[in-house]
Image (tube, helix red, strand yellow):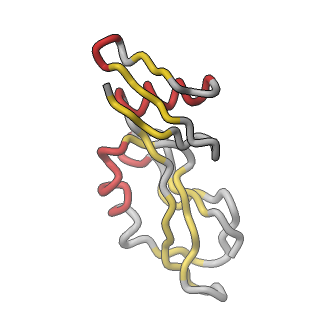
Amino acid sequence: MTELICIVCPKGCHLTVDEAHNFEVSGYGCPRGKEYGHKELTNPTRTLTSIVRIDGAIHPCCPVKTSGDIPKGIIPQAMELLKDVRLQAPVHTGDTVVSDILGTGVSWIATKDM
């Protein structure tokens, strides 16, 4: 049995996941909590946020995030993709910064007009 605290909403339900019984989840307050508990033990993913350098803007960095969840195991490689990225203003919210992160179909996107 594994105990988790659900991070899907601010309620923070205390979940118990029973690996021996097909990852059965208990302690959730909504269906999203049940899904989170199962997914966290079978295929954990995260949405990432970061910044990249930008030229021609008021600020030197532009905030970015992944357009969806990516597997936890590839987070270091996904972050490494941003190391040499340098944007040129203007950049708009939702613009793709790096597409198809490591074959996941998820992209790095800008989260601010700059």
Residue at (39% x, 24% y) in the render: 17
Report the side of 77 relative to 70 (left or right).
Answer: left
- Place residue 96 in its image quadrant: bottom right
**Residue 27 x/y as whole percent:** 52, 26
Closest to the observer, 11 or 53: 11
Above or below 91: residue 55: below
- Place residue 63 in its image quadrant: bottom right
User: Total label count?
Assistant: 0
Residue at (63% x, 78% y) in the render: 89
Residue at (52% x, 52% y) in the render: 66
- Place residue 77 in its image quadrant: bottom left
**Residue 106 x/y as whole percent:** 49, 44
Above or below 54: residue 77: above
**Residue 64 x/y as whole percent:** 55, 63
Closest to the observer, 5 or 113: 5
Query: In which quadrant is the N terminus drawn?
Result: top left
Query: In which quadrant is the C terminus drawn?
Result: bottom right
Above or below 4: residue 34: above
Closest to the observer, 61 or 91: 61
Report the side of 47 relative to 11 (left or right).
Answer: left
Above or below 58: residue 72: above
As drawn, the residue found furthest toward the top would be 21
**Residue 51 x/y as whole percent:** 50, 71
Closest to the observer, 105 or 49: 49
Residue at (51% x, 60% y) in the render: 49
